Image (cartoon, rainbow, N blue to C red):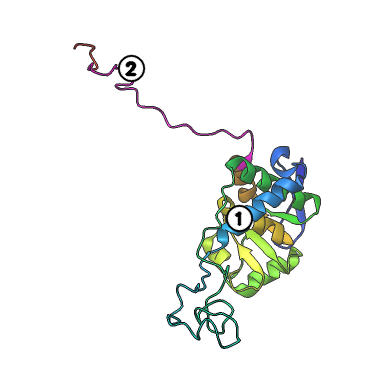
Amino acid sequence: MKLELRNITGAVVGSVEVRDDVFGAPMNAALVHQVIVGQLANRRQGTAKVKTRAEVSGGGAKPRPQKGSGRSRQGSIRSPQWKGGGVAFGPSPRSYRQRTPKRMKRESLRIALSDKVRGRQLVVVEKLELEEMKTREMAKVLIGLNATSSVLLVGDGADPEIIRTARNIPRVKTLPVDLLNTVDLINARRVVMTLEAVYKAEQLWGGDFVRKRVAAVEVGLDAEPGEDESGDN
């Protein structure tokens, strides 16, 4: 498939051929949802903590006699029903981490990029070059590209100083292509990628998934217990 190629003023200067498996993947909402849930869960710190009745100080003495007062039986003023007492079934530190397979992350990125292409929310820029390294110049470029709010700028191959000029623009986030993730892609209303970033995305996520295997150590694998490598007892 082909995508429009624009310059920094927003004018179409040509087209670029891209891989269908990266920028034309069919939607799979269930897979994208699962990856997003896992990614957001991994961001949680899990440090919320309240004290139980065993951890609240005080309350060692029985507040009143068991019988004779006509009131309810109470053994401690640090029980959950008392003001200042412990909390029943409150949060305690835990890990919310979820393991998401690499195949799912990879496929969700393809789907998210493809969804931006179908929604005409992906802009491919030939080069990011500014006359002055000023934030106002970058703001003019984004206005020309019709990217004014909730923008994800993927500027691989651009001058780092140019990327730095976008840091102070509200609702603009910059990422290298190898750190792209499903949540940032879905949340962005406009994704601006340089041509080099598009090529690198195809290298990273194009083609079939190949799992890298660590080569086994061959020395001594075939030796039987009680034998050395030469086979002599």
Query: Is residue 181 something that shows in the picture?
Result: no
Q: Nearer the viewer, residue 5 or 105?
A: 105
Across and down, in percent, residue 200 comes to: 59, 45
Mark linked to residue 39: 1
Crowding at label 1, few (<14), some or many (≥20) Cα neighbours within 10 Å? some
Instruction: Inspect the image, locate mark 1, and give the three-letter code of the amino acid beneath it.
Output: Gln
Query: Is residue 148 something that shows in the picture?
Result: yes
Q: Secondary structure at mark 2?
A: loop
Across and down, in percent, residue 55 comes to: 45, 74
Q: Residue at x 56, y 82 (%)?
A: 82
Q: Is residue 207 above or below residue 57?
A: above
Whole-Å distance between the Cαs marked 2 and 1? 43 Å
Q: Secondary structure at mark 1?
A: helix
Which comes sooner in the sequence, label 2 or label 1?
Answer: 1
Which portion, as a residue range, is magenta? 205-228
Q: Tell me whether circle 2 and circle 1 mark residues in contact (CB < 8 Å).
A: no
Name the residue beneath numbered marker 2.
222
Q: Nearer the viewer, residue 93 or 202?
A: 93
Instruction: Inspect the image, locate mark 2, and give the three-letter code of the amino acid beneath it.
Output: Asp
Point out the image quarter for the N terminus.
Answer: top right
Point out the image quarter for the C terminus.
Answer: top left
Mark linked to residue 196: none
Q: Residue at x 60, y 86 (%)?
A: 71
Image side of residue 225 versus residue 121, left or right: left
